[in-house]
Image: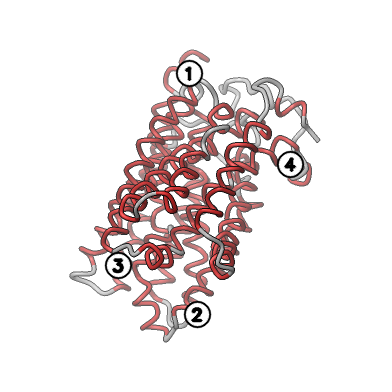
């Protein structure tokens, strides 16, 4: 039985992870942002007001993941993903029919929680938990799903807006989640056995007492890994939000910046692919020690190379680190704690990531206001990337057990 599961575990987990990550696109910022002008016009919102409302919905959904992430530990994956798609369908329907700002915010909250939150979370948890032999590659497939959504859904919205208004597009999105995504993901999740099922492979951590959230937040291994894996999403979010400031300082054309995002997505996919294979060969912790370096070199290029070249080096470096971190942050928790409570552990990580990425752009904005040079910022980041990860991420054996408590 064990051999059968090991032989067949990776493809089903990878297929489900890719599809769930793709469907999470309906709750991702890049999709919702396509309707920003329509939201402002319909509800008489300013840019700052819409940003504040969206930020509040995002922060609330992210904080709820602190507790809701454990749904992956207590429900079969089919039921968990069905709840996610139902929530996404209801949220999209509320956005489509919103008569005032209150209903709009409630709809945004539900699609952020169900799409960006739960669906993305379940995609990575499924890949990390059920792919027993090639976990890194399965987690990489979840990353491919996110990237594929970024490539396909904006194009789909652009085509749909040509023959219906924005409310019609959201009705279409609600129908997609309910009629297509839910049954498809239900079928793809069928081979993924619940972790408490008797036919599963023994998990070395399953015999240990359950790890509580309070104890997890004091766990040395968890905190030290957090100090590395939270850095890339914070830096990428901050740089992307302040891309206009960088463009002004370095005299970048907006068309070139848009091309930089294409390069970022392509490089991210390549390094997610490579990272998955490196994790399978070595470990997520081994890769974690070097994953921050490409972004640091990209940031340093802003002050050392001509602006035109720096743009490409920046987006390439950020893409490398983001691609590696995407698979590392999915696989490393299994190496530390096993799979029994993976949903709870990654849910806590997801909540902390939302909080940190909300603070990151504020911090970068303050650095700009204080007129800190790009070179000084890059050197500080590089010093962190070179010195701290090898210290924070120790040897391969006994990491989770030695630090426990």
Circle 1 — which element?
helix
Q: Earlier in the sequence, mark 2 or mark 3?
A: 2
Residue receiving disc 1: 6
The disc, 1 or 4, on the residue closer to the chain's N-terminal end is 1
Residue 332 location (% of width, % of height): 58, 33
Residue where numbered disc 2 is placed: 49
- Estimate how packed mark 2 is, as few (under 14), some (14 to 19) or many (20 or more) residues with alpha carbons within 10 Å: few
Pick the residue in front: 265 or 251: 251
C-alpha span from label 4 to label 2: 36 Å
Q: Is residue 79 above or below residue 260?
A: above
Q: Which mark is residue 169?
A: 3
- Classify residue 124 as left or right of residue 202: left
On screen, 348 above or below 331?
below
Q: Earlier in the sequence, mark 3 or mark 4?
A: 3
* Label 3: how many Cα within 10 Å (few below 14, some 14–19, many 20+): many
* Local crowd size for mark 4, using a 10 Å CA cut-off: few (<14), some (14–19), many (≥20): some
Which residue is rendered at x = 64% and y = 32% of the image?
340
The location of residue 270, given as percent across then percent down, is: 35, 36
For mark 1, does the 10 Å Cα neighbourhood hold few (<14), some (14 to 19), or many (20 or more) residues? some
For the residues marked 1 and 4, what is the alpha-carbon distance in whole angstroms? Answer: 29 Å
- Reading the image, the residue beneath label 4 is 216
Q: Looking at the image, is mark 1 or mark 4 nearer the viewer?
A: 4
Pointer 1 and pointer 2: residues touching (CB < 8 Å)? Answer: no
Q: How is the image coloured?
A: secondary structure
Q: Earlier in the sequence, mark 4 or mark 2?
A: 2
Q: Secondary structure at mark 2?
A: helix
* 3 or 4: mark nearer the eye: 4
């Amino acid at each position: 039985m064990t051999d059968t599961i090991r032989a067949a575990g990776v493809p089903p987990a990878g297929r489900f992870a890719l599809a769930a990550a793709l469907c999470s696109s309906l709750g991702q910022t890049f999709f919702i942002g396509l309707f920003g002008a329509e939201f402002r016009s319909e509800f008489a919102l300013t840019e700052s007001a819409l940003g504040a409302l969206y930020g509040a919905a995002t922060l609330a959904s992210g904080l709820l993941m602190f507790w809701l992430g454990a749904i992956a530990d207590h429900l079969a994956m089919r039921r968990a993903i069905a709840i996610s798609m139902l929530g996404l369908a209801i949220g999209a329907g509320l956005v489509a029919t919103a008569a005032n700002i209150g209903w709009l915010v409630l709809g945004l909250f539900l699609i952020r929680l169900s799409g960006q939150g739960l669906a993305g979370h379940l995609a990575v948890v499924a890949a990390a938990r059920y792919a027993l032999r090639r976990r890194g590659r399965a987690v990489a497939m979840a990353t491919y799903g996110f990237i594929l959504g970024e490539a396909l859904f904006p194009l789909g919205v652009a085509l749909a807006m040509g023959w219906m208004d924005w409310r019609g597009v959201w009705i279409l999105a609600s129908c997609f989640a309910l009629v297509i995504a839910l049954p498809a993901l239900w079928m793809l999740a069928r081979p993924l056995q619940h972790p408490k099922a008797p036919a599963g492979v023994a998990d070395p951590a399953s015999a240990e007492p359950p790890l509580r959230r309070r104890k997890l937040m004091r766990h040395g291994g968890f905190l030290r890994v957090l100090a590395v894996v939270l850095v890339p999403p914070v830096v990428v979010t901050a740089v992307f939000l302040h891309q206009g400031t960088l463009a002004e300082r370095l005299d970048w054309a907006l068309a070139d910046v848009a091309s930089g995002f294409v390069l970022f997505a392509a490089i991210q996919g390549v390094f997610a692919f490579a990272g998955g294979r490196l994790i399978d060969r070595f470990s997520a912790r081994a890769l974690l020690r070097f994953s921050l370096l490409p972004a640091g070199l990209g940031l340093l290029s802003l002050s050392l190379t001509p602006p035109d070249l720096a743009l490409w080096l920046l987006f390439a470096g950020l893409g490398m680190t983001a691609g590696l971190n995407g698979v590392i942050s999915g696989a490393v928790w299994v190496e530390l704690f096993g799979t029994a409570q993976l949903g709870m552990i990654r849910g806590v990580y997801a909540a902390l990531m939302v909080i940190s990425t909300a603070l990151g752009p504020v911090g970068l904005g303050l650095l700009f206001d204080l007129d800190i040079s790009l070179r000084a910022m890059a050197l500080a980041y590089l010093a962190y990337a070179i010195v701290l990860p090898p210290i924070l991420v120790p040897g391969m054996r006994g990491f989770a057990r030695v630090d426990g408590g």
